[in-house]
Image (cartoon, rainbow, N blue to C red):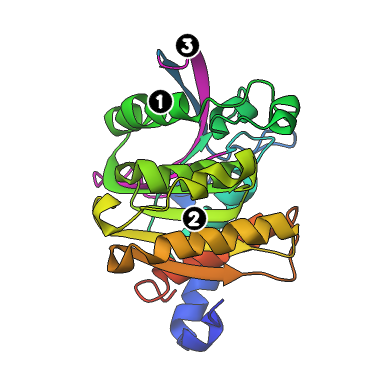
Amino acid sequence: MKLIALTFSVLSAFALLASCGSAPEGERVVREAGDPITFGIVDHVDSKVLGERRTLNILLPPSYEESKKAYPVIYLLDGATNEDYHHVAGLVDFLTTYQLMPESILVGIANTDRGRDLTHATTISEDKEALPTGGGSGAFMDFLGSELQPYIETHYRAGKKKMVIGQSLGGLLATEILLTRNRLFDTYIIVSPSLWWADGALIKGASGFSAADVEGRKTVILSIGTEHPAMHEGMRALRAVLARAGDALDVTFMPLPKETHATILHRAIYGALESIYGDDYPGL
């Protein structure tokens, strides 16, 4: 992270400390002991494609109520409150507060059947045994493009820029979107993708991937920690596939060897957002 303190003037530092310490008299909210702390809102979208109601955990930007502008949207896979919503929302809130990234709408997509939605079809018996309902990624991608994104764009002031974040099976799905339906998002943060699924069929089937398959220039951040060799093999193969698209993809590889599959996501997202926005958002 940039050393923010070095960029502060003395006056701006005092201003920041004052603003963090208290709100103006007219804006103070008195809370009683035992009151809940609210961090975002819950919404739902009824999906005809999936035949179910899906829960959305949404964090709106600090200026949302006072402004009329549209905001970039970050779609978070595994976005339930008992999954990755809270810690990713905390990152987005922190980085926007310190003007290290643009204010954005965060949409956490809660799972109902994670194995079904995040995996493509497989012929491998071990995969089918591990995830008996797997293979529904096609329908889930239809839901994202034809139902969820239109819902967000209708009910919230969503701008044109759209990002997706996925790890593990979520990274597998984000990779599938990038390779097959990349019109859905402009930016992809793909962390420790489970590309071993179906004996690596997704990457093996992308041998002809090229710039012609990319609809508009995309930004891609790839990250992996110290993990099973199969994870690294998949990442190497993915990087080789993406390299064939040339300048159509802006790909950054961010290995985090001190992290494991369990610990990598938070730090990987922090580093990815810093990499994407660092030049344009130097901080307070």
In whole angstroms, how far apart are the C-alphas of marks 1 and 3? 10 Å
**Circle 2: is it few (<14), some (14-19), or many (20+) Cα within 10 Å?**
many
In whole angstroms, how far apart are the C-alphas of marks 3 and 2? 28 Å
Give the quarter of the figure containing the N terminus. Answer: bottom right
Q: Which residues are magenta?
A: 49-77
Provide the secondary structure element on which disc 3 rests.
loop
Q: Which residue corresponds to mark 2?
A: 189
Q: Are marks 1 and 3 in contact (CB under 8 Å)?
A: no
Q: Earlier in the sequence, mark 1 or mark 2?
A: 1
Give the residue type at disc 2.
Ile
Return the x and y of residue 40 as percentages of the image width and height.
53, 38
Can residue 198 be seen here? The reply is yes
Residue 35 falls in image quadrant: top right
Q: Nearer the viewer, residue 93 or 246?
A: 246
Q: Which residue corresponds to mark 3?
A: 51
Locate residue 141 relative to residue 69 in the image: left or right. right
Q: Nearer the viewer, residue 189 or 125?
A: 125
At a point 57% along the width and 56% down the height, the residue shown is 91
At a point 47% along the width and 86% down the height, the residue shown is 7
Q: Is residue 114 magenta?
A: no
Give the residue type at disc 1.
Phe
Q: Are marks 1 and 2 in contact (CB under 8 Å)?
A: no
Q: Which residue corresponds to mark 1?
A: 143
Give the residue type at disc 3.
Gly
